[in-house]
Image (spheres, grey):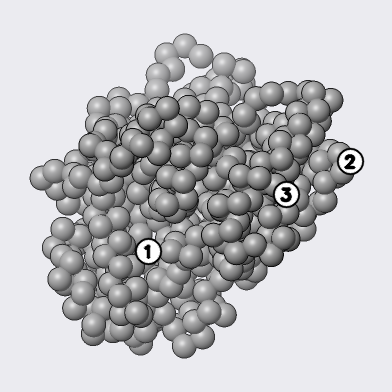
Amino acid sequence: MAGWTSDSDDSDKFEWDNDGEAEPSSAPAMRNFGSPGPSTLGSNDWINGEVPPTSLIERYVVMGFPKEMVMKSIKEIGHSDADALLELLLTYKALDDDDAVGNNHSTSGCILPVVEDDDDPDFENCDGDDDAGGRESSSDDSGYEDFMREMSERDEKINSLVNMGFSEDEANRAIIRCGADADICVLVDSVSASRVAEDCHSRNLSDHQVTDRCFNSFGGRKKARLMEESRKKRKRYGGGGQGNRPSLDGSDEESMPLPNPMVGFNLPGYSGSSVTRMLSKLDTGPPFFYYENVARAPKGEWAKISRNLFDIQPEFVDSLHLCAAARKRGYIHNLPIENRSPLLPLPPKTIFEAFPHYKKWWPSWDTRTHLNCLQTCVASAKLTDRIQRALVSSSNPPPKSVQKDVMDECKKWNLIWVGKNKVAPLEPHEMELLLGFPRDHTRGVGKTQRYKSLGNSFQVDTVAYHLSVLRRMFPNGVRVLSLFTGIGGGEVALHKLGIHMRVVISVEIGEASKKIFRSWWDQTQTGTLIEIDDVKSLTNDRVASFISQFGGFDLVIGGSPCNNLAGSNRHHRDGLEGKHSALFYDYVRILNFVKSTMAGRRM
């Protein structure tokens, strides 16, 4: 179409300043395990007299292995073969974890099927991605077909291991430990290592006897035999790669591929094989914590986030699978993942389910069934007028070139058809519906602020699905420390779940967001609300006083600013070292202090 131009230059600009941000003078220095330091170990007992670097020991420690176990393993076999060392540690760990069996205990090595997303992350806005109108949303169930295909591949690997003589339980544990996309040879090795541990335990050896004798005499022979069987089976079934086993030399920070489809650890109503995970005793709650941010952060940032949050594997979820709009997010938490339940009634899952009255005007060549991630601003009237004029002057249906140009803008700005040849942005109350908030939740502030606050919020249905496990655990209500509260997405989720909030300490700097949240609280809640303006002003002494006053916290929840993580922020995409996103480290600081203080009170 002659004369068509995009509205990118003269439409409303994206606003990258989150209401809930403050500018720290510098990012606090966190656990820098990669930095070399002087070793405190002697060299007499080390293989070849070579003292391992402290950073190497620290890396295994943050993976959940006790320091003494790491040092003993390195003394036995050295540290030049990372795979052999990890295998030995996993075996030792199996012996020590017998008393930690439960719904939420073990290593955090649960890794979902991963596929690098082909879409350019630079087109992601601060609040999500602009690609829901592409591959995943071209049909109602394409995402679910991908999910079922991934689950089918997982089941095939389980069947292969069973056919090789392993039990289904052994196969499942191996996949949990090594990742669902690990090569079959890696899974075989994992099962073999576990069998060594179980065999040692079956001899009724004490822990000290196991570690001192099992791998010196009998254990060494047994392991050699099992490893020989493992090599034979690998040769028979092919493959020799290391699957998705994390690198231990720091290269794992280079990339944390996103799962495709992005469905988290499980989905509401899914009856197939569900992912299970186990956390170490130190990482389990209470206090529980829940952290959220954009899934498509710069390379290495999610690995860094995970390392600072107890090395727990992120749960990546696109809300497209729960509602009518995409919202790709990563969540790190220590909540149980079994016995989750969705909010009822279920939210509308397609555009026409959410807005049936727009179907009358929807052209057949607009095949969208879902909207893209909701942004902090909307298209200008100038753009929508230009689209209308272009369509009026075209044939019916318009030429393919016109269709493409119009669809590009519709997907970019989430435009909907409100009349013949007429598109318009979503209204704030329509965004509230898609995000799971009650109607008029943001009413009372300017329209621009409503869009901005909604664009920076949680998707309530997704968060509520994760938090639903708290219902049975806290029948008398919860005490919440809410960092970067925004407009209260986490609190609305708890309220919809029927979980009483006895007290909420809310930390939020944006005046509009605070006004919205306070208004909702006053209308719906009877608990105690204490508001703090700036996360920087929430010192450890102040946190300690709240713990003393209220007896601790049951949940620490929040999502730090995504300004320096989001793909559309081309000029300041500095990751966690950016001046806004560095506030993540205050979340870590406060969470660590809460956990350590409450642990001290229990002793």
x, y percent for residue 166 = 82, 46
Crowding at dot 2, Cα within 10 Å, few <14 / some 14-19 / many 20+, comes out as few
Which mark, residue 163?
2
- Looking at the image, residue 119 sits to the left or right of residue 479; the answer is right
Distance, label 1 to label 3, CA atoms, is 39 Å
Give the quadrant of residue 184.
top right
Q: What element carries label 3?
A: helix
Which mark, residue 405?
none
Against 551, residue 310 (above or below) is above
- Looking at the image, residue 514 sits to the left or right of residue 53; the answer is left
Give the quadrant of residue 249.
top left
x, y percent for residue 185 = 72, 31
Give the quarter of the figure containing the C terminus: bottom left
x, y percent for residue 6 = 40, 23
Seen from the viewer's position, the closer of residues 136 and 161 is 161
Determine which residue is flagged by label 1.
Answer: 557
Going 26% across and 33% down the picture, which residue do you hit?
36
Determine which residue is flagged by label 3.
Answer: 195
Which is more N-terminal, label 2 or label 1?
Answer: 2
Observer able to see residue 241 = yes
x, y percent for residue 39 = 27, 38
- Looking at the image, residue 192 sits to the left or right of residue 86; the answer is right
